[in-house]
Image (tube, rainbow, N blue to C red):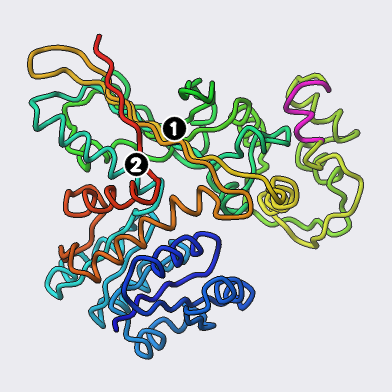
């Protein structure tokens, strides 16, 4: 019996391992550096073998021992290339949900020659968004249609009944990653004009977006959208936008914090400082933290931003648990403490594609594809399911010979997205399509 090796035993791994144990005829091994994480997997899946290992150091030894046919790499993106090199050397296929990095992309020709398949960007976003877009765009082109505008927005949020804090957000990924995204550079095209927003300026350019059945949200540009014109084969489009969905107020909050340097990475001596002391020093006081912040931004104490900062703890008079820390470290600590799900709460994943086209006979249409998915209290979260199951499906299909294309790929080709989307629908993860004619 062949082996699928899952690297990483965090939240996303649960639904991934669950799918493999239900649907794949193979031995499943899960490796992680954390015995706590592995214990959760072992308790839930007694037939799965778990092994404690530092993947950053010992991936090759692990591969030599278990000789897996496929590796599902759920480790941080920084390990994509090093693990990929080890896989390539042993002709092991690899699947990863994170964005393809340049170094891994450089393995493309070597993978082709060796008959090895690497599939990256196969989670929710990126992943399901790619597959939905590629499938719909191919159908439109095959019918003679022309793409005028492509817009895709995705977000992982607390469901309305679990949205119980004034920030309108709860963590479904690491707080440091969330904080890091607050200074992400964005690029998009609107009406044929390219826009470049560095260092978090995207948060200063939000829009409202209505999700059918859920109401209004904020969207802001996420990363560099321009390369997707070529990746999706829609060079004719004059608009391309990939955005993130949040509850209203998020962009205002992040923009204010960014303007005051709360996301900077330079370490400071903070020994003995309270959170309020840090806030005053960060802004350039003197005075009480709330008063200093109000004055710096010309805001009233009752403004939503000031109240959010107070709730999060930036005016608290207890000593911070650091001797040295960056502003980003301090924000991450408060996020990890306050923006968390309680037992019995559920998350929400929303993915909305909006493609405007001109048909072969000159008619204007808008094609909508919408995924609304809720987590299960006491079970899998939606973000874990929608991120963990797609790579598990691809790993299974590589093992079974249904996906056989060597090289380094993202899931924008029919050989990948057609079988994976079909199987996702069987798992209850499917976008609903709607076409509106003008």
Question: In the displayed structure, does residue 332 sit left or right of residue 59?
Answer: right
Where is residue 140, by image quadrant? top left
Q: Looking at the picture, how far across and down is residue 347, in whole percent?
A: 58, 43
Q: Which residues are the magenta region?
A: 301-310
Residue 188 seen anywhere in this rendered image of the structure: no
Helix, strand or loop at label 2? It is: helix
Residue at label 2? Answer: 129
Helix, strand or loop at label 1? It is: strand
Question: In the displayed structure, does residue 180 sit left or right of residue 127?
Answer: right
Residue 317 seen anywhere in this rendered image of the structure: yes
Q: Mark 2 Cα within 10 Å, few/some/many (few <14, many 20+)?
A: many
Q: Mark 1 Cα within 10 Å, few/some/many (few <14, many 20+)?
A: many
Residue at label 1? Answer: 221
Question: In the displayed structure, does residue 19 sit left or right of residue 365?
Answer: right
Q: Looking at the picture, how far across and down is residue 367, in whole percent?
A: 27, 24
- Position above or below: 133 against 190: below
Give the number of callouts.
Answer: 2
Examine the structure image and report whether residue 395 is included in the region drawn in magenta: no
């Amino acid at each position: 019996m062949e082996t699928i090796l899952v690297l990483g035993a965090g939240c996303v791994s649960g639904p991934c391992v669950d799918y493999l144990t239900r649907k794949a005829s193979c031995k499943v091994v899960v490796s992680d550096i954390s015995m706590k994480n592995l214990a959760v997997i072992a308790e839930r899946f007694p037939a799965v073998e778990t092994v404690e290992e530092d993947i950053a150091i010992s991936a090759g030894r692990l591969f030599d021992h278990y000789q897996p046919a496929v590796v599902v790499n759920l480790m941080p993106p920084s390990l994509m290339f090093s693990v990929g090199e080890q896989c390539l050397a042993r002709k092991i296929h690899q699947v990863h949900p994170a964005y393809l990095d340049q170094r891994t992309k450089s393995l493309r020709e070597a993978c082709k020659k060796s008959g090895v398949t690497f599939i990256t960007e196969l989670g929710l976003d990126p992943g399901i968004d790619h597959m939905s877009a590629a499938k719909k765009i191919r159908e439109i082109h095959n019918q003679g249609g022309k793409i005028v505008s492509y817009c895709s927005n995705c977000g992982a949020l607390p469901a309305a009944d679990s949205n119980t804090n004034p920030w309108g957000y709860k963590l479904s990924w690491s707080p440091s990653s969330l904080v890091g995204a607050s200074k992400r550079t964005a690029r998009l095209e609107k009406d044929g004009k390219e826009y470049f927003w560095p260092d978090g300026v995207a948060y200063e350019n939000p829009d409202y977006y209505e999700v059918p059945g859920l109401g209004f949200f904020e969207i802001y540009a996420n990363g560099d959208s321009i390369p997707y014109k070529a990746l999706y084969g829609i060079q004719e489009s004059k608009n391309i936008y990939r955005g993130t969905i949040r509850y209203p107020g998020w962009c205002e909050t992040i923009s204010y914090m960014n303007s005051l340097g709360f996301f900077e990475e330079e370490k400071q001596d903070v020994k003995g400082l309270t959170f309020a002391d840090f806030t005053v020093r960060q802004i350039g006081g003197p005075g009480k933290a709330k008063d200093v912040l109000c004055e710096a931004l010309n805001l009233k104490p009752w403004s939503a931003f000031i109240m959010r900062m107070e709730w999060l703890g930036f005016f608290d008079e207890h000593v911070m648990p650091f001797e040295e820390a960056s502003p980003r470290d301090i924000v991450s600590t408060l996020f990890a403490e306050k923006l968390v799900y309680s037992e019995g709460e559920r998350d929400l994943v929303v993915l909305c594609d909006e493609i405007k086209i001109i048909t072969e006979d000159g008619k204007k249409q808008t094609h909508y594809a919408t995924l609304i998915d809720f987590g299960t209290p006491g079970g899998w979260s939606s973000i874990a399911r929608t991120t963990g199951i797609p790579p598990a499906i691809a790993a299974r299909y590589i093992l079974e010979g249904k996906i056989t294309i060597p090289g380094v790929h993202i899931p924008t080709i029919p050989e990948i997205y057609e079988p994976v989307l079909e199987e996702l629908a069987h798992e209850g993860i499917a976008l609903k399509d709607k076409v509106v004619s003008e």
